[in-house]
Amino acid sequence: MRHPTDGVLRRLLDEPAGVAEADRRHVADCDRCLAALAATREDAALVGAALTTEADVDVPAAWARLTAAASASAAPVRTPAPAPAPARSARRGRFGELVRRPATAALAFGVVLAGAGTAAANDWLPIFRTEEVAAIGLDSADLVALPDLEAYGDVVMTGDDDLRPVPDAETAEAESGLDVPEVAALPSGITGEPEYQVGGEVTATFTFDADRAARAAAAAGEALPTPPPGLDGAPVRLVAGPGVAQVWQSGSGAPGLIVGRAVAPSAFSSSGVPFETVRDYLLSLPGLPEDVAAQLRTFTADGSTLPLPVPSDFVTTTTEDVDGEPATVLATRDRTLAAVVWVEDGEVTVVAGALDTGEVLEVARGLR
Amino acid sequence: MDLVRHPLPGAAVPANALALPAGVVPRIGGRDGVPVPDAPTRSALRPDLDVVFRREYRRVVSVAARVLGSRDSAEDVAQEVFLAFNRSSVPAGEAGGWLSVAAAHTALNLIRSGRRRASNEETAATAVPLAEPDVAEVVVTLEERSRVRAALARLPRKQAVALVLRHSGLSYAEVAAALDLSPGSVGTTVRRAESALREELTRHASSH
């Protein structure tokens, strides 16, 4: 009979009763499988030991902390959220740090948007002048599997992508050069004044390196597709920002509503190689799943879309209209978080929060 | 392959703006335009929270601690996870898997976001191994623990979560249900993750 798979051998270590009798008998009599089982056991033990951490907890104390926090977050709706302490504001640099602690269900959006921030728009997708945003259904495993461009050339970042708090909308407008969107009516449960954050313009320059890309391709067991003439050594400059955000705390002190706006990313090339050529070539590099590449090609065919990869296993997307512009609406499948994103006149705007899709759309459509 | 280290600005500004909801705490409320009166939804505690908390808290901390290597940080994550559960409509019967997956994702997000970068050394220094008879012969240095956690954050998310849940004591059936995998593929997923982490350790060991 065929040798059981690695997965079956792994389960044999933990739950032998869950493994078919025939497989168990085979392994017992097969030197090759016994050797593989020993290696599996060794790896499992090593990783298990490396991950083990003392976790002796005081459950009653933790319960007291939780109930206090839950009560605080359930404060009457009319109670304005306390203004953030200056010290805390000063400590928060990046957007991500606005959040004092990670929130959970955030996990879904965390994946998308961590997706958007990292693998995301994955370093090279935003090389187009963005005119609209399109959501692409990707499995989250695909997102993290997208290739890192550093394997294919040099990446140099300049500018300041840190966000800094500013005291009011006027300052935010003066420093960002953007109109700060004004929310007409806050959704139920969101109260008080927002905190304003401003981020500067950032630039990244990617310079394709054929030798390095060839090594990366070889590591993936494939040959590097022939680069288009003129691409090797030619820098592509990506520019985005500045941006501005307004953040309303919810009763628990975590952000409950965020309205952000930034200059949409655009790209410049000094080599004369058309962006479409660069894009199509990058899409063909080994490591990118073909089905994903095919989706991306479709979405970027006109060179004017910022695809927003979305892990379809966590998030649903729909398209709505915000003041005549097509907008992408995202909602976690458990319906705890929603966001709407659109691009107008070269600026990308996002409204997101612990709200439902109707509420984020209402805020979005009511922006002045 | 490190997708986190150098987000490019194209991703940086709009994506950072988009990254904000990662911190948003969900609430129960009007869904799909159906308004829910404020008062009932804002009562402090779900009636079943106490039971679920006492049943699941240790395991939730354990899951987060395996990712973060620090009990204190893990307890912070557990608090956030239970607060979100309290606001959610997740049925109590599904709470165990939901909470464990949420703890794993939240902890992985923390590592991935780099917010813990500054305290990595402290994490490694405070990681205290449990005496586990089965693996007593396995010697893992603090540096290796730290490296394994960094590698964990680079794994495909599903592999990382499956690995952490399995090592936190969830059965194959529970991991399968929590991650929407077939029970048969849990072993494969966990094995791949362990193999990748083992390679990480071996690669470093051989380079010294």
Image (spheres, coloured by chain):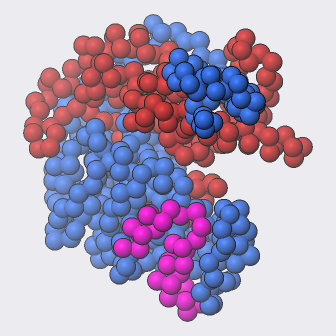
Chain colours: A blue, B red
The answer to whether B69 appears left or right of B162 in the picture is right
| Residue span colored magenta | A269-298
Q: Which residue is drawn at 54% across and 21% down?
A: A21
The answer to whether residue A135 is left or right of residue B125 is: left
Find residue B95 and report its horizontal and vertical position in percent: 35, 22
- Most extreme residue toward the top is A60
Quadrant of image for the C terminus of chain A: bottom left
B194 to A142, vertically: above or below: above
Q: Does the magenta stretch include residue A286?
A: yes
- Residue A77 lies in quadrant: top left
Going 45% across and 30% down the picture, which residue do you hit? B183
Image quarter of residue A301: bottom left
Q: Where is residue A153 in the image (x, y as percent from the top left)?
A: 67, 72
Q: Main secondary structure of the magenta part?
A: helix
Image height of A169 relative to B114, above or below: below
Along the line of sight, which residue is nearer the eye, B90 or B165? B165
Residue A294 percent across, percent down from the top left:
42, 69
